[in-house]
Image: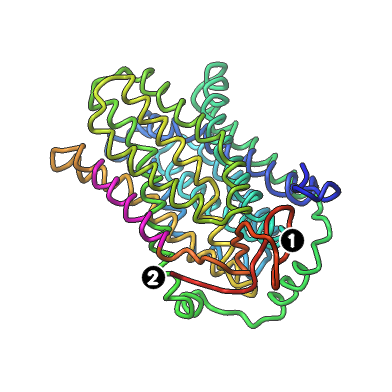
Amino acid sequence: MTAPGRGAAPLFPLRSVVLGAFVPTLLLETGVGAMLPVVAVTATGRGANLTVAGLVAALVPIGKILFDLPAGALAQRLGDRVAMLLAGGVATAAFTTIAVTPGLAGLAAGVLALGASTAVFNLARQAYLTEITPPLRRARVLSTLAGVHRVGLFLGPFAGAAVIAASDVQGAFWLGTGAALAAVAVLAVVRPEPAPGGADRERAGRAGAPRVSIAAVAREHRRLFATLGVAILLVAAVRGARQTVIPLWGEHLGLDAEVTSLVFGVSGALDMLLFYPAGKVMDRFGRLWVAVPSMLTMAGGLALLPFAHTVGAVTVVAALLGVGNGMGSGIVMTLGADVAPAAVRPTFLSVWRLFQDTGDALGPLVLAAGAGVGSLAAGVWATAALGAGSTAALARWVPRYSLLANLVRRDRGGPGSVPDGDSRVPAVRSGSS
């Protein structure tokens, strides 16, 4: 694939981007997707009650949150590619531990380790692609990465179901082992292409810079985290709620499990269709053209869900949520890449991802709180309010024009403009309003 107006320059270089990031991501996420649906079932089969089984299933996001900050320090010290290799190795060991140990403790330890390895892998992968990707193509690359992540999680349950049908439930974990091992093999075999000169300078700057603590980075950029970081937390909370709200509402209406799964699949399919258009719009017109419509659409869908009492109405709302989520594919990673200082990028992104993963866990908790007080609809409307809040926060704090962030606008050129097809990058004018 080539960039517009640059026929000789591939948008996704085969070795560094496709084989160095997209393929390992697809493999690892397929393994995770195969495992997630059977964690709770496996826990109950190993003697856990429903409460404990739910806690074991929650250890993946808990592992991510616990290891988001150490992941940044690790990637800063070892380098992005080595950190991805290490994370893939830990994921392989985690899947294998779950498959070979018969007890509940082995399952819990493996699931927690998998969450931790996913935190390291995701952060190092984002930092790696940010470093090697030209800024004028950043959103398309990162939105495609988000799309690959979605595809892997979508395919994983089907692959896991096929393996389980041919063997037993342990087969899903062995599938995860094979997928993680394949991801490590691809990363080990594929040597990165020479980085562009700017990326080489950034890498040299990182290597030569004194080591900075996570606390120092968070303190230095505290205003950014208190504004745009909070907006990202709200975005992630709405997205986390989306994963839970359709199954919960289907259960509330008494829909059959297969009907709910089909409705959820429709939402996921629409979500996956939009990742590349989302990135192209962000690269050409700016981040706000995607961020605000995406969250408005999701907030509207959530607000409408309590009025949906038939399968058809729920399907329409689920489709709206899928379109809204797909419209924002890659927005969180792209904004993080835009504002991350090159010298401490992995450390900065570890704090950024902590906001993201905390929000992802917060969304389902808001729904659960509503259900706990006797009104699931109230929980749904609360998450809709979070969506409206995230829209306002993004509109207020996403930078408008910045050469560093490559937030572009249509223009006829002029002093300070840099051409890229039909787009122009204006002269530096950072803004947070």
The residue positioned farthest toward the left in the image shown: 374
Dividing the picture into quadrants, the one containing residue 430 is bottom right
* Quadrant in which the N terminus is drawn: top right
Residue positioned 69% across, 59% down in the render: 82
Callout 1: SS: strand
Q: Amino acid at mark 2?
A: Ala
Q: Is residue 306 left or right of residue 332?
A: left
One can see residue 96 in this view: no
Residue positioned 55% across, 55% down in the render: 333
Query: Which residue bears the numbered disc 1?
Result: 419
What secondary structure is the stretch in magenta mostly built from? helix
> Could you classify mark 1 by the number of other residues whose Cα lies within 10 Å: few (under 14), some (14-19), or many (20 or more)?
some
Residue 312 in percent (x, y) is at: 33, 19
Q: Residue 392: within the magenta?
A: yes
Dividing the picture into quadrants, the one containing residue 349 is bottom right
- Front-lying residue, 382 or 112: 382
Relative to residue 237, is residue 150 depicted above or below? above
Residue 233 in percent (x, y) is at: 39, 57
> Could you classify mark 2 by the number of other residues whose Cα lies within 10 Å: few (under 14), some (14-19), or many (20 or more)?
few
Query: Which residue bears the numbered disc 2?
Result: 226
Q: Amino acid at mark 1?
A: Pro
Residue 401 in percent (x, y) is at: 56, 67
- Front-lying residue, 255 or 103: 255
Q: Is residue 128 left or right of residue 60?
A: right
Residue positioned 73% across, 70% down in the render: 203
Residue 158 in percent (x, y) is at: 54, 24
* Residue span colored magenta: 380-395
Q: Is residue 22 left or right of residue 336?
A: right
The residue positioned farthest toward the right in the image shown: 8
1 or 2: tag closer to the N-terminus: 2
